[in-house]
Every structure is written in structure tokens, then in C-alpha cells.
Image: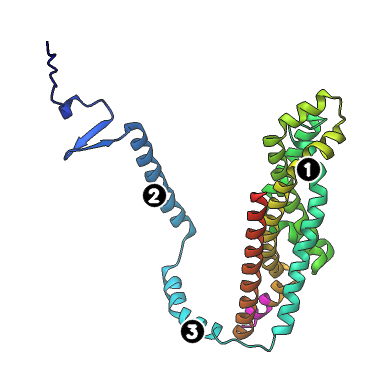
Amino acid sequence: MQQQTSFQAYSPSQAQPGVQTSGGKIRIGHRRTQRQTRLFFAAAAVLFLVCLSLLDLSWEQFRSGIAGLPDIMSKVMTISFHAFPALLDGMVTSLIIAFLTVVISVVLSILLSFLIAENITPFKWAGRALRVVLLVIRTVPTTIWVLLAVASMGFGSMAGVLGLIFPTSSYLIKSFAAQIEESGDDTIEAMRAVGASWLQIVFKGLLPNLLLSFLAIISFRFEMEVAETVMLGMVGAGGIGVLLQDYISYYEFADLAMGIIIVFVTIFAVELISNRVRSRLARR
């Protein structure tokens, strides 16, 4: 006996809630998600209009600035090699400031990161207190730290190094601690089971395994540090930023153009080297 199977025609009206059909196509739409998306864009639009009104922008000034932009660009396109030696020396100084800042910050951050990592810290209350201090440091903009250093020590490279150490160390400590908390539990439990001390767990168990991750973080931070050093040099941190600020103040656009080219080439080269270092570390 042959069994007969009957098929019931599917009607769009029988679709489950949340599944919409149109033109033979099935479109899945979650009503709650769509409503949240519409609310998000509506709130963003309202916030944008409020911010626009609070800034009290002058459209006449904006139009006049746009009209004068071609003249400024034509002046910047005129490159002068007269200040090339001074600019190159300033760029080298900026690189040295960035390098010294990262090295000193790494030395400070290695041990402190193990003190605030929740899975390895010997004193949880001290680790939590240190987290609060780092949070306060991160909430203060880097420019403020450099200005404080300039106010206490005067203009120059030393103020740049001192002002950048605080935000750089805070960034590295937080990043290192996150790596420790993500990848160190098994090693910590195994070494504690055999009676290893805290220092043995840190230097013989965790640090060798985390060294490549730390190096990748350090290379990325150095890339950021070079760009910040150039920018903060304009407020007295030393390096090529001081020269760029002088050229802008005295409308020396030809020398400014040469400085921009040197900064661009240097940061581009640093980024390429940093990306290659991180890619090689990732393959190991």
C-alpha cells in the first residue's frame, strides 16, 4: 500500500511573529531591535542639534575660512629646505623623548601590573587602591600632564619626558594587567600547587609566557608616543613640535611644509616597523 502524503500550502499569514514577508522574500525583523535602533538614531540627532546650538558656530566665519583655504594651501605647497637641519634635529629629539618615555614607563609598569592583576596580586586592597590611582591619571588629559611638567621644570625635553610618563605608565599597566588576567590562571594554579613563591610565579611562570604579548603592546604604544610627542611639543614638551609652533605663529608656511613632510615620513616609517614587529610576534 502506497502512502499518500499531502502538503499544505504555506501562507504568509501563518508566519511566526517577527518574520515578515514581502514580494516572495522573507525578511526577519526583530521589533524590539528595530525600535531601539530608531531610538538611538533619534537621540543622536537630537544630541547633535543641541551640541550644534551650544557651540554657537559662526557660519560666516566658516565660509570666510573656506574661501581663504586655497591661499593657505598654495603657501604650504611651497617647500623650503632652509630649515631642514633644524627640523631633522627636532624630529630626532622627539623620537628620543618618545623612546625614553616608553622605556621608563615599561620599567615602572612591569611590576605594578602584577600587583593590580586580580589573579596574582598578593595584596588585593593595594591593587584596588592602585587601580583608583591609575583611573585618576587616565582621566587627566596628556596635555595637562605636560603643561604641569612645563610649569614645574620649564620648557624642554625633560618636561616632555616627565609629563608623558604618567599617562604612558597608566596605559601600559592597565594593558599588561589585562593580559595577565586573561592568560595566567592555569600557570598560577600549577605553580602554587608545587609551592612556588609569588616572585617565582611572576618571573619564572607568567612573564616568559606573556613577554611576546607585552612586546606587541609596547610597540603599539611607542607608535602612539611618537605622534603625541610631536603634538605636545607645541605646548613646550620639546622636539620638532616647538619648531612647528614657531612656524605657524610667524606664518612661515614653507618651513612648516617641510616639517609636516618630515613628521609624516617618520610616523609612517614607525607605523610600518611597529606593524611588522607585531605581525612577527603574533606568528610565534
Q: What is the total number of numbered labels drawn onto the structure image?
A: 3
Q: Amino acid at mark 2?
A: Ala
Query: Mark 3 = which residue?
Result: 71
Q: Residue at the location (80% across, 61% down)? A: 100
Say whether residue 220 is visible. Answer: yes
Relative to 124, does residue 135 appear above or below in the rendering? below
What secondary structure is marked by label 1? helix
Q: Which residues are magenta?
A: 244-251
* Depth order, front residue of 104/238: 104
Q: Which residue is identified by label 1?
A: 208
Quadrant in which the N terminus is drawn: top left
Residue 218: x percent and y percent?
72, 53
- Give the Cα distance between marks 1 and 2: 50 Å
Compared to residue 79, the image places residue 234 above or below, namely above
Which badge, 1 or 2, comes first in the chain's sequence?
Answer: 2
Mark 1 or 2, closer to the camera: 1
Going 79% across and 30% down the picture, which residue do you hit? 125
Outermost residue, front side: 1
Q: Main secondary structure of the magenta part?
A: helix
